[in-house]
Image (cartoon, rainbow, N blue to C red):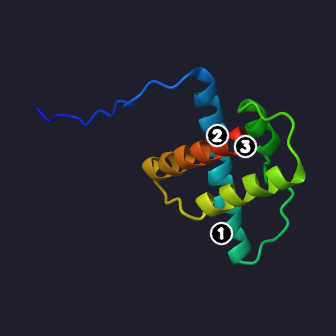
């Protein structure tokens, strides 16, 4: 009988963090897809979702200015370029984004 590898989270995250992480993961994947489409010449696609305001609001940053949004956008752009086609890679980058946004919120 083969044993299956079962992954359990090391920590239990609050529901609010899980929602934010889910939204961040989806935004990272979306950005990565549209970056790839841009590389092959498909620009300005109307179908690209933008979960930015939803992510910021889910993390308690309802009021944000242009400077904060620019930092947020730079964080997601940087992290989306680092993901690979694996759930672990996406989750690792999503956790990093979450941590960076938490420190941005604390400022």
Q: Nearer the viewer, mark 2 or mark 1?
A: 2
Q: What separation in Å lies between label 3 and label 1 (alpha carbons)?
A: 33 Å
> In this view of the protein, can residue 60 be seen by the observer?
yes
Which quadrant does the N terminus fall into? top left
Dot 2 or dot 1: first in sequence order is 1
Determine the residue located farthest toward the front in the rendered image.
107
> In this view of the protein, can residue 47 be seen by the observer?
no
For the residue pair 16 and 70, the one nearer the viewer reads as 70
Q: What separation in Å lies between label 2 and label 3 (alpha carbons)?
A: 9 Å
Residue of label 3: 107
Lateral position of residue 62 relative to residue 39, left or right: right
Residue sitting at x 33%, y 34%: 7
Q: What separation in Å lies between label 2 and label 1 (alpha carbons)?
A: 28 Å
Residue of label 2: 102
Residue 25 location (% of width, % of height)? 60, 44
Lateral position of residue 66 relative to residue 72, left or right: right
Image: 54 above or below 65: above
Residue of label 1: 36
Instruction: Tell me the crowding category of disc 3: few under 14, some 14 to 19, or many 20 or more residues within 10 angstroms, Cα based.
Output: few
Image: 92 above or below 5: below
User: For the image shown, how many numbered marks are present on the structure?
Assistant: 3
Instruction: Tell me the crowding category of disc 2: few under 14, some 14 to 19, or many 20 or more residues within 10 angstroms, Cα based.
Output: some
Lateral position of residue 92 relative to residue 18, left or right: left
Q: Quadrant of residue 37?
A: bottom right
Dot 3 or dot 1: first in sequence order is 1
- Determine the secondary structure under disc 2: helix
Dot 2 or dot 3: first in sequence order is 2
Q: Which mark is residue 51?
A: none
């Amino acid at each position: 009988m083969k044993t299956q590898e079962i992954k359990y989270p090391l920590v239990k995250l609050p529901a609010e963090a899980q929602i934010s992480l889910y939204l961040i993961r989806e935004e990272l994947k979306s950005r990565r897809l549209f970056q790839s489409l841009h590389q092959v010449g498909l620009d300005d696609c109307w179908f690209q979702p933008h979960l930015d305001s939803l992510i910021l609001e889910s993390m308690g940053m309802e009021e944000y200015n242009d400077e904060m949004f620019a930092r947020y956008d730079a964080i997601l752009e940087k992290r989306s370029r680092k993901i690979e086609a694996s759930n672990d890679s996406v989750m690792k980058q999503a956790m990093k984004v979450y941590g960076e946004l938490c420190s941005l919120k604390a400022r």
